[in-house]
Image (cartoon, grey):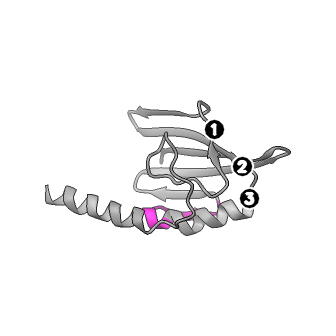
Amino acid sequence: MVRIRHFVTALVLTLAALPAWAEGFLAAYEDLPLAPGLTEVAGAGVSFDSPAGRIVEAYGHGAVKVADILKFYAATLPQLGWTRESDTRYRREAEVLRLDPVAERQGLTVRFTVSPE
C-alpha cells in the first residue's frame, strides 16, 4: 500500500510539472501528452495488451513544425520517466515509444507507437 501511495504521489508531482502548454493527453495512452498544436486523430489508433506487453498506436495532427514537436517531447518525456535514445525514440521500463512525424500539405501528422522491447 505504501508503494502505491508513493507511486501516485510521484505521478501527481510529475504531471503537475508538465509544461502548461501541453494540449492534453492521448486517449489510447493515458500519460503521453499531446504537443501544442496537435489534436488526436479520433478513431485512427489502436490499443491492446499482448502477452509481451501493451501495444499502442495513436495519431496527432496539426499545423506545427517537426522541430517544435521533437523539442517538446525531448523536454517533456523525461519528466514522465522516458529515457531519450534518439530524437524519435524513447524507452521506459520494458516499453519503447516511437514518434514518427510526417509533414503533409495539410499539416503534420505524428504517429505514436508504444510497444514492448
- Residue 20, compared with residue 108, is above or below; it is below
How far from the left and from the top, in percent, is residue 66?
Answer: 74, 58
Q: Dot 2 corresponds to which residue?
A: 62
Dot 1 amino acid type: Val
> Is residue 4 rendered magenta in the image?
no
Q: Dot 3 corresponds to which residue?
A: 66
- Residue 4, compared with residue 75, is above or below; it is above
SS label for mark 1: loop
How far from the left and from the top, in percent, is residue 99?
Answer: 63, 52
Mark 3 or 1, closer to the camera: 1
Between 66 and 63, the one nearer to me in the picture: 63
Disc on res. 115: none
Disc on res. 41: 1
Provide the residue span drawn in magenta.
Answer: 78-87
Mark 2 or 3, closer to the camera: 2
Dot 3 amino acid type: Val
